[in-house]
Amino acid sequence: MTRKVADCRKYPSVTNCSLTISGEEEEVVRAAAEHAVSVHEHTDSPELREQIRASLDDEKAGV
């Protein structure tokens, strides 16, 4: 299974967040949604999780 990566540096934010989350897709979506709610004040919703899922990249080998 290909590991996925969510990287806050791809998106401008007031906090200049530099968090990167990697793991299996469902783990990353869950953790990134929790982070988006607790740090960036988003509302957890199916739409947020789908936006996160769509933004994930495959982890490069050796990372």
Image (cartoon, rainbow, N blue to C red):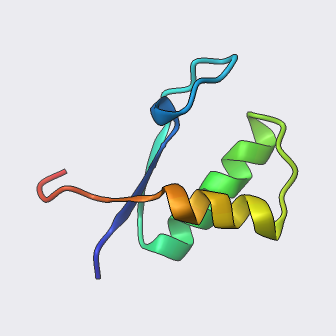
Residue at (71, 44) in percent of width and height: 36
Measuring from the top left, give residue 35's x and y in whole percent. Answer: 68, 46
Q: Quadrant of residue 59?
A: bottom left
Q: Quadrant of the N terminus?
A: bottom left
Q: Nearer the viewer, residue 54 or 23?
A: 54
Q: Quadrant of residue 29?
A: bottom right
Measuring from the top left, give residue 33's x and y in whole percent. Answer: 69, 56
- Placement of 30 over or under 7, stated as above or below: below
Q: Is residue 37 left or right of residue 2?
A: right
Residue furthest bottom in the image:
1
Residue at (74, 34) in percent of width and height: 39
Q: Nearer the viewer, residue 31 or 50?
A: 50
Measuring from the top left, give residue 48's x and y in whole percent. Answer: 74, 58
Q: Is residue 48 left or right of residue 19?
A: right
Q: How many marks?
A: 0
Measuring from the top left, give residue 52's x and y in whole percent. Answer: 60, 58
Residue at (48, 28) in percent of width and height: 18
Residue furthest left in the image:
62
Residue at (83, 58) in percent of width and height: 44
Q: Is residue 53 left or right of residue 5?
A: right
- Placement of 12 over or under 10, stated as above or below: above
- Placement of 55 over or under 25, stated as above or below: above
